[in-house]
Image: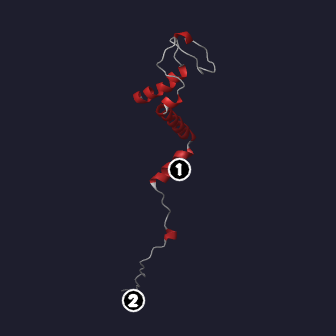
């Protein structure tokens, strides 16, 4: 001990003052905050989710059977019955595109 200086131990407490601690966010919350700030990422996610939902709901969304041929309706232009027209075998183009998303997602 130095002459004239007395060392006093600090007072210890068992409580924590949370007001001084930095706020920590969870990894999920951090990810969602960063994710939704970037418009290109959000747009890409919307496109991917739309493709997946189209592939899952293909039997409900497709207006015609994509494999059924009808030569009397071959190479029709787009109209109210066939929104994207028909191919050389009379198959509905829109139905074939909708069912094609299933194959595209399986390959990719």
Q: Position of residue 16 (x, y in %)?
A: 45, 73
Secondary structure under badge 1? helix
Mark 2 to mark 1 CA distance (whole Å): 59 Å
Please state the total of marks drawn on the protein image. Answer: 2
Residue under the point 51% across and 26% down:
98
Q: Position of residue 40 (x, y in %)?
A: 55, 38
Q: Is residue 1 above or below residue 78?
A: below
Q: How is the image coloured?
A: secondary structure
Near-viewer residue (41 or 93): 93
Near-viewer residue (101 or 82): 82
Residue under the point 53% across and 50% down:
33
Q: Residue furthest right?
A: 80
- Numbered label attached to residue 3: 2
Q: Residue furthest left?
A: 1
Q: Is residue 68 above or below residue 102?
A: above
- Numbered label attached to residue 45: none
Residue under the point 51% across and 38% down:
45
Near-viewer residue (78 or 52): 78
Q: Residues within 10 Å of mark 2 (few under 14, many from 20)?
A: few
Q: Position of residue 21 (x, y in %)?
A: 49, 67
Judging by the rendered image, the residue that carries numbered circle 1 is 33
Q: Is residue 16 above or below residue 102?
A: below
């Amino acid at each position: 001990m130095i002459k004239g200086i007395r060392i006093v131990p600090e007072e210890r407490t068992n409580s924590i003052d949370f007001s001084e601690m930095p706020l920590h966010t969870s990894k999920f919350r951090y990810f969602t905050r960063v994710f939704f700030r970037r418009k290109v990422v959000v747009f890409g996610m919307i496109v991917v989710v739309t493709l997946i939902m189209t592939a899952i709901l293909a039997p409900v969304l497709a207006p015609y059977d994509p494999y059924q041929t009808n030569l009397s309706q071959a190479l029709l232009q787009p109209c109210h019955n066939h929104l994207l027209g028909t191919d050389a075998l009379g198959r509905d183009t829109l139905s074939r595109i909708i069912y094609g998303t299933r194959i595209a997602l399986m390959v990719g």
